[in-house]
Image: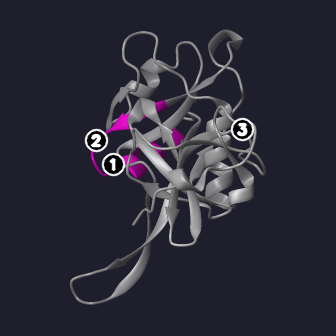
C-alpha cells in the first residue's frame, strides 16, 4: 500500500534529491499525488486500508492516507517551485528556504512496513518509554513502546509533521534506548 512514483535520483544540475513532507489541502492527498505523477515529480503517498461502514449499513474497505494532509516528494535543488505550484499543495514542511528533509531510510521503512502490513495509523505521542528495534527491516529505528493486551507495539514518530505510526514487534526484537539489552516490563504501559 502506498503509491510511489520514481524518476532519476538527481535534481537540477545533477544535485542529489532528498525527501520532503508536503502539506496539502484537506482530503486532496490523492489528487495532489496524481498531479505529481503527471508532472513527473517523484512522490510517495503512504496509504492504509481501513474498514468503513456507511449510513445505509453497507461495509467496505477504503484506502486512506496514513498521514492525513501529507504526502512526500523527492526533489533536488530547484524542485520546490514545481511542487508548490501543484494545485492542493499548501507548503513544504519545514518552512523557509531550507526545508527539513526526511531520511531515505524512513521513507524506505514506511514503504516496506506498508507492503508487509505491519503499519497502522496512531495518534502522535510526545512521551513514553523509548525503545530501539534490534532485528528485521526496521533495525535501528527508535520509537515509543506500548502494550496492547499480550501484543507489543512501537509507535514511531515523524516529529516534523507531528504524525505517528504503530507497528507490531516481538519483545525480543526491541531494547530500551541507552541500555544494551533487556526490557524493564514495569515501564511498559497498557494501551487501548
Is the residue under label 3 in contact with that under label 1 (CB below 8 Å)?
A: no
> Residue tagged by mark 2?
25
Label for residue 186? none
Rate crowding at label 3 as few (under 14), some (14 to 19) or many (20 or more) other CA atoms within 10 Å.
some
- Taking the magenta stretch, the answer to whether it contains residue 28 is yes
**Foreground pick, 158 / 170:** 170
Is the residue under label 2 in contact with that under label 1 (CB below 8 Å)?
A: yes
Q: Residue furthest right?
A: 135
**Foreground pick, 11 / 185:** 185
In the picture shown, does residue 97 fall above or below 58?
above
- Which circle, 1 or 3, is nearer the viewer? 3
Find residue 111 and report its horizontal and vertical position in percent: 64, 49
Find residue 74 and report its horizontal and vertical position in percent: 58, 30
Find residue 34 and report its horizontal and vertical position in percent: 47, 47
Q: Give the range drawn in magenta.
A: 21-37
Q: In percent of the image, x 74 and y 57: which residue is there?
A: 172
In the picture shown, does residue 159 fall above or below 151?
above
Q: In percent of the image, x 57 and y 35: which residue is there?
A: 40
Rate crowding at label 1 as few (under 14), some (14 to 19) or many (20 or more) other CA atoms within 10 Å.
some
Horizontal side, residue 60 vs residue 112: left or right = left
> Residue tagged by mark 1?
28
Task: Calculate the distance from the C-alpha at mark 2 to the C-alpha at mark 3.
Answer: 34 Å
- Which circle, 2 or 3, is nearer the viewer? 3
**Foreground pick, 2 / 176:** 176
> Residue tagged by mark 3?
140
Horizontal side, residue 132 vs residue 161: left or right = right
**Foreground pick, 173 / 54:** 173
- Taking the magenta stretch, the answer to whether it contains residue 169 is no
Amino acid at each position: 500500500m502506498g503509491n510511489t512514483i520514481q524518476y532519476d535520483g538527481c535534481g537540477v544540475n545533477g544535485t542529489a534529491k532528498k525527501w520532503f513532507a508536503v502539506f496539502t489541502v484537506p482530503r486532496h492527498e490523492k489528487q495532489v499525488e496524481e498531479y505529481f505523477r503527471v508532472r513527473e515529480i517523484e512522490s510517495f503517498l503512504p496509504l492504509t486500508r481501513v474498514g468503513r461502514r456507511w449510513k445505509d449499513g453497507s461495509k467496505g474497505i477504503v484506502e486512506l492516507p496514513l498521514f492525513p494532509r501529507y504526502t512526500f516528494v523527492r526533489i533536488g535543488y530547484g524542485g520546490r517551485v514545481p511542487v508548490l505550484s501543484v494545485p492542493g499543495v499548501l507548503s513544504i514542511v519545514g518552512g523557509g528556504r531550507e526545508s527539513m528533509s526526511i531520511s531515505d531510510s524512513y521513507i524506505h521503512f514506511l514503504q516496506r512496513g506498508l507492503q508487509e502490513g505491519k503499519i497502522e495509523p496512531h495518534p502522535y505521542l510526545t512521551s513514553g518509554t523509548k525503545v530501539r528495534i534490534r532485528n528485521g527491516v526496521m533495525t535501528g529505528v527508535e520509537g515509543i513502546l506500548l502494550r496492547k493486551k499480550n501484543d507489543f507495539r512501537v509507535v514511531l514518530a515523524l516529529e516534523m509533521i507531528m504524525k505517528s505510526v504503530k507497528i507490531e514487534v516481538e519483545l525480543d526484537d526491541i531494547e530500551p534506548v541507552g541500555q544494551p539489552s533487556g526490557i524493564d516490563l514495569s515501564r511498559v504501559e497498557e494501551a487501548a
